Image (tube, rainbow, N blue to C red):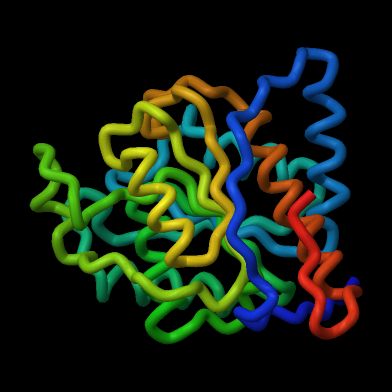
Amino acid sequence: MSLLLRTHPDLMHTAVIPSCVPPAPEQSATVENALLQALAGLAIVIVPGLDGSGPHHWQSRWELFLRQHGITVHRVQQNNWARPTYQDWKAQLQRTVRTCHQPVILVAHSLGAVLSARMASEQGLDGVVAAFLVAPADIDHYHGPDSGRVAGFAPLPVTPLPFPAVLMASQDDEWLSMPRAHTLATQWQATLVNAGTVGHIGNHAHVGLWPDGMLALDGLARSLRLRATAPTGTTPHLS
């Protein structure tokens, strides 16, 4: 299945979607099935952040779930998760994307989201048609104990990304305040989604398969199909 997408920056928009309402248990299967339909013909590239994503991380759970249901998933593997360098991580992301034979959606977390946004703004990413950026680490303003390990990824881009993006942020994330999430979403022309109060949405978030995130990714994937069929000059909105 081929999917031809127009992803010129002029087609992007900035919006704010209010905090997700957790789906009832009986709705989870509906969310999952809808996402599988929306991702048909696309490849997912998982981009973990600092220290990688463990087996209980939502990225790892998504990787297993999507592969079990026939979606193409690639995961970026870094040589050093604890002491990252921008050049090394960039090379690995680029290498992973080049292995894909379908249009790619990046599914990135924390420093992986920063890596994805910076690479895209500096040089583009051939084959990537959208990015789902979760809790990007605000390395320009974060002064916590791990700030030295991520300093080499600064500065954050301040220009629109070359493809549609969703930025999903938590209200109590020590790495990214909600006002800064608004600023980054505006600068990148990404759709901002409020994830509620789930911290940094990382290895210790305990969000399971994270249906809220699946719902937001489903909206991004469906918007790509709308963009692919929309008349030139129109801007379809995320569903």
Q: Is residue 79 left or right of residue 10?
A: left
Q: How many marks?
A: 0
Of residues 46 and 67, the one drawn nearer to the viewer in this rendering? 46
Residue occupying image coordinates x 42% and y 78%: 121
The front one of 194 and 46 is: 194
**Relative height, residue 228 to residue 187 (above, below):** below
Measuring from the top left, give residue 213's x and y in whole percent: 62, 37
Residue at x-position 43% and y-position 66% = 187
| Quadrant in which the N terminus appears | bottom right
Report x, y in % for residue 139. 22, 54
The percent position of residue 178, horizontal first and vertical second, equals: 38, 39
Query: Position of 162 compared to 157: left or right?
Result: right
In x, y percent, where is residue 220?
71, 54
Residue 66 appears in which quarter of the rendering? Answer: top right
- Residue sitting at 60 percent across and 79 percent down? 9
Report whether 154 appears left or right of 201.
left
Depth check, front residue: 148 or 84: 148
Residue 152 lies, with reference to residue 228, above or below; the image says: above
Side of 63 where 186 appears, left or right: left
**Is residue 150 positioned above or below 159 on the image?**
above
The front one of 143 and 110 is: 143
Query: Which residue is most to the top?
Result: 25
Task: Please give the name of the residue rendered at 83% of the width and 52% of the height, measured from the top-left corner.
Answer: 38
With respect to residue 172, does 115 lie above or below?
below
Q: Quadrant of residue 78?
A: bottom left
